[in-house]
Image (tube, helix red, strand yellow):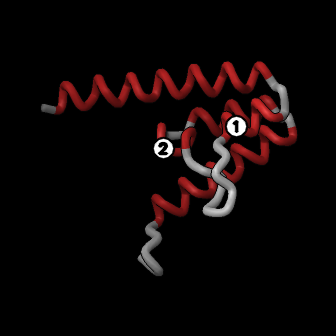
Amino acid sequence: MKNGINKKSLQSILCLQLLIDAIARGELSQVILLLADSTPEDVSAYYSNNDKRTALHIAAQKKNAIFVQLLLWVSFYLCLLHLILSYFAE
């Protein structure tokens, strides 16, 4: 771990950056691939410290209803899965 960033954090940051870039370019297949490997934190994370928009904000600003709906569904199912798994882990 260097400068407080571990490998998992770096992967998460990279996934978020790639996800938002794919949304901005309108690349549906790339967005789907990135969402398949995302966590709830990835989907709802800020783009950067200076830019507090999330992937959902970018999709809405681009007026891309498909990406907006996809991000909402994925966020819901990831959170639901996390809740179920934590319930059974107790």
| Residue shown at 58% from the left, 33% from the top | 36
| Residue shown at 67% from the left, 19% from the top | 69
**What residue is shown with label 1?**
57
Nearest the camera: 45 or 34? 45
Q: Residue placed farthest to the bottom in the image?
A: 3
Q: Is residue 56 above or below residue 67?
A: below
Q: Residues within 10 Å of mark 2 (few under 14, many from 20)?
A: few
Residue 88: image quadrant is top left
Label 1 residue SS: helix
Image quarter of the N terminus = bottom left
| Residue shown at 72% from the left, 45% from the top | 20
Total numbered labels placed on residues in the image: 2
**In front of the other: label 1 or label 2?**
1
| Mark 1 and mark 2 residues within 8 Å of each other at the beta carbon | no
Q: For the residues marked 1 and 2, what is the alpha-carbon distance in whole angstroms? A: 15 Å
Image quarter of the C terminus = top left
Q: Is residue 10 left or right of residue 16?
A: left
Label 2 residue SS: helix
Q: Position of residue 12 (x, y in %)?
A: 54, 53
Q: Which mark is residue 78?
A: none
**What residue is shown with label 2?**
41
Q: Residue placed farthest to the left in the image?
A: 90
Nearest the camera: 1 or 49? 49
Residue 87: image quadrant is top left
Q: Position of residue 72 (x, y in %)?
A: 59, 23
Q: Position of residue 51 (x, y in %)?
A: 69, 56
Q: Residues within 10 Å of mark 1 (few under 14, many from 20)?
A: some
| Residue shown at 81% from the left, 25% from the top | 64
Circle 1: residue type: His
